Image (spheres, rainbow, N blue to C red):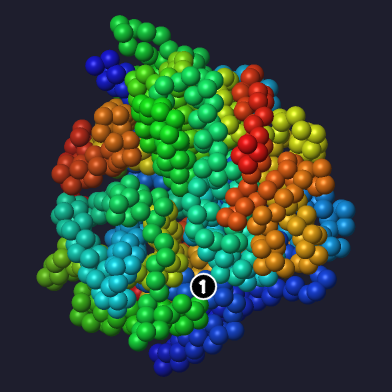
Amino acid sequence: MNTQRKSLLLAAGLVLIAVVALFAKRSEVYLLTLTCVYLMATFGLNLTVGYAGQMSLGQAAFFGIGAYIAAIAMKAGVPFLVVVPLAAVACFAVGLALGFPALRVQHHYLAFATLGFNVLVFLIMRNEEKITGGTFGISAIPRPSFFGHELSGAVPFFYFTFISLIVVAALLWWLLRSPWGRAFAALRDNPIRAESLGVNITAYTLLAFAIGAACAGIGGVYYASLVEFIEPGPFHFSTSLLMLLAVIVGGSGRFMGPVVGTVIIILLPEFLRSSNVEWLKFMQKWYLAFFGMAVIALMIWLPGGILSFADRFKAKGAAK
Amino acid sequence: MGDFIQLVFSGTATGAIYALAALGFTLLWQAAGVINFAQGEFVMLPAFGMLFFMAMGAPMWLAFLLTCVLSMLILGYGFKRVIVDPLIKHGVIPLVIATLGVSIAVKAMVRAGYSAEAHPFPSPYPDGQFALAGINISYADVGTLVMAGIIVVVLQSFLNKTVTGRAMQAVAQNSDAARVLGINVKRMVLYVFLINAMLAVVAALLVAPTYLAKFDMGDSIGQKAFFAAIIGGFNQTRGALLGGVLIGILENVVGFYVSPAYKEGVALVLFLAVILFRPEGLLGRSEERKV
Amino acid sequence: MKNIVRTLAATLALAVPLAVSAQGGPIKIYDIVELSGGGATAGTNFDNGVKLAVKEINANGGILGRKIDLQSLDTQTNPGVAKALSQKAVDDGAYVVMGPVFSGSINVSMAETKKAEVTNFTGGEAANITQQGNPYIFRTSFTQSTAMPKLVRYIKDTLKAKSVAIIYGNNDFGKGGRDVMVKALEAQGIKVAADISTDPGQVDFSGAVLKAKQSNADALFVYTNEEESARALRELKKQGYDKPIVGETTLTGQKVIELAGDAANGVIAHVGLTVDAPQPAIRAFDDKFQKEYKYKSDHNGMKGYSAMYVVKALTERNGKVDSKLLAKSLHGAKISAKDSPGVLLDVTFDDNGDLDRESFLVKVVNGKQVVTETLPPASAK
């Protein structure tokens, strides 16, 4: 399938989704929007994990930071389009601050540091009631308003989020195609060689991590606006693990990997839950069990993720 | 002052439980290169296992022994053969992800297949306290410390004084060199898995009375075990012990004197501090930087 | 390939069957409850109560000749999920939404039922639930604002306590209760000797109990969710706490007794609902529930069961299956247990959605709840 046909198919797929949203029920549109929001975070995570080769276990923390910034700022009247870059920059900065000491020591410590960071952020969100509302959270978060119109409808907000997601993905795509992106690829494929060629591993890894964090922050802003209520629960460390799984199951280091993974993690359980067919209802309870086992099986037979399946059919050559 | 000592004592007891889980975790990493994200579930399953046997009428000690055997078989040998062996050649990350998968699957299976609720677990020790020099000490805490202490001492003697134990240590330090020396590396690694499974059952016995047996009880234990192992030093078994006990004590003390809300933050802050300032852990040795 | 996946996902999402609520078809009722997570105990019991009531009602011809189609959904004790599920329920044409039980979740999900003008019953007890001007929310148990003063009267008159230590859980439910309790205690001139916060999901209560002991209060008030209550009681026993321990419904609930074992004996609570109450309607419920589910219900089971019968009674009174009308008619409604034994106790609803009923003082003796006193409804002064 050549690039032109791929792009056409992609465009067709996007249009199809946009059209489907018009006819779907409100709760289904809500789900689609939620998937888009999580996709922003998992695309970012893919950059860190797939392209820079680092295990980040704290993506949900950045997601949450973005969400809380959005909640507090938007309730104070700051316009949505100002909050988004604000959250992105804040998460970028925090990502740098977290990654810098962790990477100087030993690279796999970034994973531990992000884990600890997530747990810490969660604790702060839960305890600092005056700022974050504690376990009660922050409610009545407004939707974005443009020219006096609030996007309170499910479908308009979905389109807005969908387009934003495309913009974020496009930016990442452009980044990966640029000289920076090629440096990332070099990092992942052969770090020693990359270093010998003058690529500063630590600097690029740090950058990838920080950009990934910023993406999650942006996703968090949309999340807060979508659900109109936030509390610490969704930003727990376990969500970071799910996001990591989404990236790896889909295929880390592949651009569309997060899409496959996030759909499996968000849409599939919902579909099972809302189905009225008997055996699918049974799956509702057992879904996670099968998912866990599928992850194990996947790692044994297809560690490159679902999308790496396509490589089995490609001619011998570079898979990445 | 009496309160402080009481807190330290009961914190040591709780910490001893974390230490057991952390010990197994560290051994797995050292000897087999496995970061077991399902360690918490390795404690949860035996808790339910023992409940099952006791519900069938077995006295606690018998349930414990039966569960030990079962656990070593499934969570020790089975885990190694089915998951670790096929994956070890793919590298660390796929293996870690696979243990994540195990954790998720096992939790879901218990929840869907058995029960999502908490279940009481009888304590192996009598309730109540006794006074010693003006301090109240509970029987459970003493019992926990004694049992954990015995296990640790036995394990340490095994590792240091027997040939098999020393062979296991050799494998942990440098498996290639060990192989050259004629040590059956594969079997040593298997022993490590078996020991880990057994340690988890002991931890379950000691922790389930307080935690209550529930499908997600492994989350917090697994996390503390992980923190304890890193804090103490991932490449030192004594580190796991120190890490566990330290967490137990500090949590109690901080929770009481400073703020109950940030009690969980204690292990975390220690963990972060260690990562950033002394990554080899409090008792660990500095590792070569691996590229 | 990736596009196929995405298209497939979107089509699947569309393929979820659309609601069919034709005239004369079954009445859709959604039970949105905590079937897992920290609220699993409460939610499962509530759900079982609702299911039992639905089974009985359907066996007797349903409501106005129409059978009830009940769907139970799991919120995982997550308010965000509860919100999404409520949206789904109202989209699907639900007549009534039952649940969630946990105050944290209902506070979020009831915005959806309010928007859709669908009557929503909840098991939540936090005071703020009925203070937000939502005409569609109705309780199935007392609000803390009614319950606590009753308990304080007992503490003052019977226990003759001059100071009370409080251990509470740090969530909507626990904080709400603590706030109301503190106010009620102060109103009666009783000192709050210690105010100890604990976390939902907290395992280790040694510090909290130690603090309570140190405060030397005349009595201890414990207000946390089920599992935490069990752990607290066990720790209290372990540390040999010897002052009276009092609480509200949860503290002496079935599950807590089961989990805490011996440690629950001697605990006293003000209870809105208990299966061990002497009233014949409640005895009948206890038997039926045990026969159906092979275990003893807790107060949450009674909440779900009675609420379902309230729906039946009022719908029949209205003669129409109309959620907006139902909500309107509930405000100020009186239902007697003689006419509708399913509601278990005479009950009146006020304009905020709060209810008023008799209540009980319960003591745990030998692992069983024993009713020591029946207290009249607040309005019957």
* Residue A136 can be seen in this image: yes
> Compared to B251, does A253 lie above or below?
below
Q: Dot 1: what SS?
A: helix
Q: Residue furthest front?
A: C381
Rendered residue at 37%/77% (across/down): A144
Output the chain of dot 1.
A
* Residue B206 can be seen in this image: no
Please state the horizontal and vertical placement of residue C67, each as a whole percent of the image.
82, 61
User: Toward the viewer: A78 or A169?
Assistant: A78
Which of the image's four quarters has the C terminus of chain A? bottom left
Rendered residue at 45%/67% (across/down): A227
Rendered residue at 42%/41% (across/down): C179
User: Toward the viewer: C212 or B243?
Assistant: C212
Please state the horizontal and vertical placement of residue B41, each as a whole percent of the image.
48, 41
In the picture provided, is B117 more to the left or to the right than C282? left
Quadrant in the rendering for residue A5: bottom left
Q: Which residue is mark 1?
A: A30
Please state the horizontal and vertical placement of residue C151, each as a whole percent of the image.
53, 31
Q: Amino acid at mark 1?
A: Tyr
In the picture provided, is C76 more to the left or to the right than A176? right
Label 1 crowd (10 A; few <14 / some 14-19 / many >=20): many
Please state the horizontal and vertical placement of residue B223, each as a whole percent of the image.
38, 42
User: Toward the viewer: A54 or A270?
Assistant: A270
> Compared to C205, does B235 lie above or below?
below
> Compared to C175, does C258 lie above or below?
above
Quadrant in the rendering for residue A84: bottom left
Q: Residue furthest left?
A: A198
Rendered residue at 37%/8% (across/down): B131
